[in-house]
Every structure is written in C-alpha cells, then in structure tokens.
Amino acid sequence: MSADGPRCDAVVPTVGRPRYDVVVPTVGRPSLSRLLAALAAAEGPPPRRVVVVDDRRDRSAPLLAGGVPDGLRHLVRILPGPAAGPAAARNLGWRACSSPWVAFLDDDVVPRPDWAVRLAADLEGLPGDVAGSQGRIEVPLPRDRAATDWERNVAGLRGARWATANLAYRHDVLAALGGFDERFPRAYREDADVGLRVAASGYRIVRGARTVDHPVSPAGPWVSLVKQAGNADDALMAALHGPGWRARAGVPRGRRPLHLLTSVAGVAAVAARAVGRRGVAAVALGAWLGASAEFAWRRIAPGPRTAREVTTMVATSALLPAVATYHWLRGAVRARHVAASPRPAQAPAGGRVAAVLLDRDGTLVEDVPYNGDPAAVRPLPGTRAALDRLRAGGLCLAVVSNQSGLARGLLAPAEVAAVNARVEQLLGPFDGWFVCSHGPDDGCGCRKPAPGLLLAAAAELGVEPADCAMVGDIGADTEAAAAAGARPVLVPTPATRPEEVAAAMEVAADLEVVADRLLGVAATGVDR
C-alpha cells in the first residue's frame, strides 16, 4: 500500500475512458496555473470535470491571473471553500463530483504528460475491495549540491503512504466513510486518518504507476518551526486510532521522545538556576546543549553546509524540541475532548428521493432581479438535460420560489405567471409551482428560509417532506429544507456566499451532479 516502489517509465497504452473527476484544493499558490496547464496538455482520457476548491481566506484577487487553460475551460468548476483546512476543502470537492473515481491532486504538483493514460491503466479492472489507487510523487532535488534540510523534508513525500497529493478514491467509499475528518485542520494527517479508516473497513489502497512531480517551494528559515504545529494532529491521531497508528499508516516514529527529554533538560536547567541549584543546573544545561548539538549535526551533516544553512540549523535545532513538545501537549489536551465527542455530522451519502423541489432564479435560470419579462429567461447550462433525466427516473419536480417583487409592487402576478410559463416552455413541465409573494419583513411562514413553501409542495405532491430534496443556490434554500425535514442540496454560483457553502451539508457542482446522486447512479467500478 506504500506509494514507493520500482520506477517504470514504459509507455502504458490507453485502456479506455474511465469516469473520473479531479479535485484540487488550493490556497491560491501560483503553482495552480502550472498544474492546470499540465492537465490541459496531458495525453489520455480527460476527467469528466475538474473541481477546484478556492480555499483562500481573501478572495479579492483573481484565483487564476491567466484564466483557465483553453483545454479545460469546459471542465473546470471553481467552488468557494470554507477556508478550514485541506480536509474540509477536499470534502467540498468530492461531494461536488459524480464520477465513480475522484482523483485528488494538490495545487503544488505537476502531473506528467502521461498521467491520465497511466491513471486509466491504474484503475482498470480493480476489484471491489480496492478503495484507492496511490500514485507516485517525485520530488526533484538539486543535482549540483546536497539538498537542504527543507528540501529533504519535502522529498519525504516520495515514500509517503496514502498521500492525497496524488491519490484516487472511489466516490462511494468516501461517501460511506463520511470523507475526510475535518477535525484535522492541517495537511498530512488527514490523509493518514482516512487511509486508516479505509483499511479498517476492509478495503485496500494499492499502488499505481502514474506520477506527479512536486517541486520544492521556497521557504523561510523558520519553516521547520512552523511545521511543528502538526504535532497536535499526531496527538489526535493517537487518540482516534490508538498508539500503534504510526506503524499501520507507515509513518516514521520521529524524535518526539528525544524532543521531550531535551525540553525537560532545558526547563530543568532554568528552574535549577532560579532556585540556586547551580550543580543541577549545570548538568541539565549540559544535557540540553548535548542533545541540541546532536540534533543540529544530524540536520547539518547531509546538507550543503553553507553558512546560511548551518546558521539556520543551529538556531532552529535549539528551539525545535520545545516547540514540538508544546504543540504535542496542546494537541493531547484537545484530543482528549475531541476523541470523546462524536464526529461532526457529514453530508448525506446520497440516495433516491420521491420529489425534487427546485429554486427558480439562480438554480434553473439566470438570476435577473425582479424579472417580469419572459424574454429575459435564460436557462442555466445543462439544466434541461438534468431535469429530463429526473423526470425519466420517475421523480416529481416542483418549483418553490420567493418573489418579493410582488410585495414590493415591482412585479404583477401576471408577469410572474408569464415568466414561469416561459421557464416551463424552455425546461419542460413541472408538477407544481409554489410562489411566496411576501416581503422579507412580512413575517410569513412560507418565504424561504421558512419551511412553508416546501411543506405545501410536499403535501400537494402527496409525498413526505423527508422524501424530498430541496435544490437551491443560497443558504435560505438549504435552511428551508432543514426546517421542513427535506434533504438540502446547495448548487453554488458566484453569488453564493462562502459562509453559505461552508454551512451546507451537501454541495453539488451543477444539476447534472444532483441528478446523478438523486437517481442513485452507481459509483463503483470504471465506466466506459
């Protein structure tokens, strides 16, 4: 199950067109453009869609200065992320997918030209007990000098087990397991956690031949200290998976016991000196200096040994044991409470429903404020095909729409009726139309996010609210669904607020994905 293995550069023949989606969480690194350009130029079967989760806290600047490459323009969906770490971003991404396989890539890797060809070969014919395929990660290192400590640290990804920088999972397995555990706010351990849960469920993760390159990004002199925050996640891993989790996940033990002893020696030296125990202080100080020197030399010896590198290693080696121990202890305290509490609720895994309730503006058609002109009705791409599939699947369809323009005197009832008729003309018949004519301050029980419209629609259609899915583009739609006891599905648009996406229990990229989920389209195997 390890990602490392013999290198094979033979050309792999194309074996067909597997159905897979690509998910890329990003914090806006410039390397994202390089990744997308590589995907656009890649040989082999393209993904069904590429979901990019924009997980930046500040989205004031464009995510892609040069735009999406032409070869991917029709495939890429950019979703605003919750800015809560890679686990949450990946969850948002895979839940917006519908293909049987979800191929995860990090925004700082570069797929090789034959990546898609090899992915197809990696997934071909995998038995049902294989939940994941781990690709190779190569880290180019300098050839004219020894690698620095930071470069060697990044190079550790070459042998990392279950590294989601290049790993494909079955969609239905992720759904069954609830996806990534969002209690891990940083990278690395959320990978090991989901891998352990996959293995504990009786599935396997096998190695594939596809490869991505992971260039070493520039880093400041204190990067090793910043990375020690991950020790808190190690404490959570131990609490969730037991003390043997490292061996099962293929994670090296590291130097935590030595860091703890070094920190104790340093604290003892300061404490003994403070109470006048100079002899004890001298011994403790000697132990601290010796341990710090040994640690620094281990980091200096294999490196380039430039003045800058040596100075950085000496300074950080003196501080790192204490920083690592602090984060571990802090994480251990938190882990006791986290492990004792139930895992946060995850989005529903999907399934059939009896009726689909749909918002109109921004979900079925372009949102034209207070539109009373049938000529201005423009269906969103793919909407008619998705609705026809739902109809063919035997599901009832109804529209539930807030139209406060009626209360504000900006629309006449006849105008709303004419627009609705045009929607039906373009998108096909609906089993019911339910419109709230009140304003936001009227205090009615029908205007979303109140559940009245949804309850009325369910009653008219002769189904229980729990057997309905409510599909909309804003938080009011999902809140109304929750209040009515229906299944809420958010299909974000550029107008959807990031906090609404973060709060949504289920997110889909478009109505095509919604149709796949609600019709129970199989999510196992590789379709051709």
Image (tube, grey):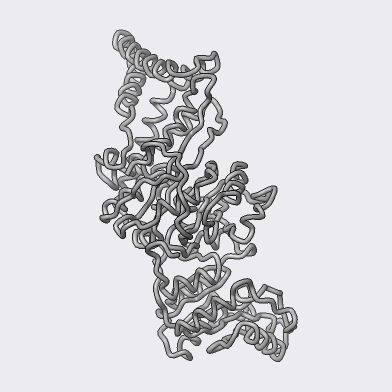
Q: Position of residue 521 (x, y in %)?
A: 42, 71
Left or right: 31 as drawn, with respect to 183: right
Residue 373, placed above or below residue 119:
below
Q: Position of residue 377 (x, y in %)?
A: 70, 79
Question: From where the camera sits, is residue 88 visible?
Answer: no
Name the residue located 38 percent from the left edge and 50 percent from the top edge. Answer: 133
The quadrant holding residue 207 is top left
Q: Position of residue 158 (x, y in %)?
A: 42, 35
Q: How many marks?
A: 0
Quadrant (top left/top right/bottom left/bottom right) for the N terminus: top left
In-front residue for pair 296/323 = 296
Name the residue located 32 percent from the left edge and 14 percent from the top edge. Answer: 287
Question: From where the camera sits, is residue 296 visible?
Answer: yes
Name the residue located 56 percent from the left edge and 83 percent from the top edge. Answer: 399
Residue 317, placed above or below residue 15:
above
Residue 492, placed above or below residue 196:
below
Q: Position of residue 458 (x, y in %)?
A: 46, 86
Quadrant (top left/top right/bottom left/bottom right) for the C terminus: bottom left
Name the residue located 31 percent from the left edge and 38 percent from the top edge. Answer: 250
Left or right: 10 as drawn, with respect to 367: left
Left or right: 508 as drawn, with respect to 425: left
In-front residue for pair 162/281 = 162
